């Protein structure tokens, strides 16, 4: 008798990570350093969603290949050296991976880290260029360049 198959997509694996990130978000909400931040709870929810999207291995850390994928998705591919420099800037040179705490600190911090600029750019690009839905419009010979 075959064992029951689990649905793919990582839903079961993401659940513990989701809980850990919620706990970290609660710490940020209670931190007096961020008490003056407007819409902090909403921002943390967006940061959590983005972080989980780019945490490819579900280990709670964004590694070099995850940052590479993120940059390629944004249409701004980087060399490994540039990616390592970005990670080093975010972590302060302490780690080769970006933890959720580092990620949130950068996004809420006053420094203009490369990662923060990239994430803000992605949000603005998605707002101003909504993807059209449905099939493309029909064209005739006269409309071609």
Image (spheres, rainbow, N blue to C red):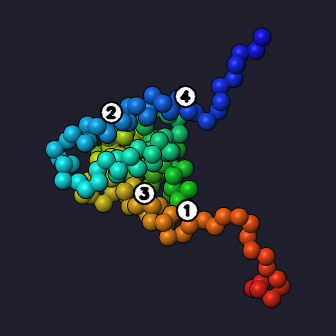
Q: Tell me the residue that label 4 is attached to.
A: 12
Sequence order check: which comes first, mark 1 or mark 4?
4
Q: Residue at x 55, y 62 (%)?
A: 75
Dot 4: within a 10 Å radius of its alpha carbon, few (fewer than 14), some, or many (20 or more) residues? few
Left or right of 113, for residue 68: right
User: In the rendered image, which residue does mark 3 sit on?
Assistant: 119
Q: Which residue is mark 2?
A: 23
The residue mark sitting in front, 2 or 3, is 2
Q: Quadrant of residue 141?
A: bottom right
Outermost bottom residue: 142
Q: Is residue 54 above or below residue 141?
A: above
- Residue at the location (39% across, 55% down)? 115
Q: Is residue 88 visible?
A: no
Residue depth check, mark 1 versus mark 4: number of the one nearer the observer:
4
Q: CA distance from mark 4 to mark 2?
A: 18 Å
Cα gap from disc 1 to disc 4, whole angstroms: 30 Å
> Of the residues under marks 2 and 3, which one precedes in the sequence?
2
Are the two marked residues, 2 and 3, in contact with CB atoms closer than 8 angstroms? no
Circle nearer the N terminus (1, 3): 1
Point out the image quarter for the C terminus. bottom right
Above or below residue 21? Residue 119 is below
**Who comes first in sequence, dot 2 or dot 1?**
2
Q: Residues within 10 Å of mark 2 (few under 14, many from 20)?
A: few
Residue placed most toward the observer, 56 or 88: 56
Please tell me which of labels 3 and 4 falls first in the chain: 4
Circle 3 — which element?
Answer: helix
Point out residue 118 in the picture as x, y percentages from the top left corner: 43, 59
Q: Which residue is mark 1?
A: 75
């Amino acid at each position: 008798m075959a064992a029951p198959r689990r649905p793919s997509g990582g839903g079961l694996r993401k659940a513990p990570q989701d809980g850990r990130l919620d706990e970290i978000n609660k710490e940020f909400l209670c931190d007096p350093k961020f008490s003056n931040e407007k819409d902090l709870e909403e921002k943390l929810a967006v940061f959590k969603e983005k972080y989980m999207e780019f945490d490819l291995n579900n280990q709670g850390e964004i590694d070099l290949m995850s940052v590479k994928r993120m940059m390629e998705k944004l249409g701004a591919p980087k060399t490994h050296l540039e990616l390592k420099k970005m990670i080093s800037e975010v972590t302060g040179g302490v780690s080769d991976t970006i933890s959720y705490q580092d990620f949130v600190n950068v996004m809420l911090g006053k420094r203009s880290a490369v990662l923060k600029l990239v994430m803000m750019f992605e949000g603005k690009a998605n707002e101003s260029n909504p993807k059209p839905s449905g099939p493309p419009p029909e064209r005739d010979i006269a409309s071609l360049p």
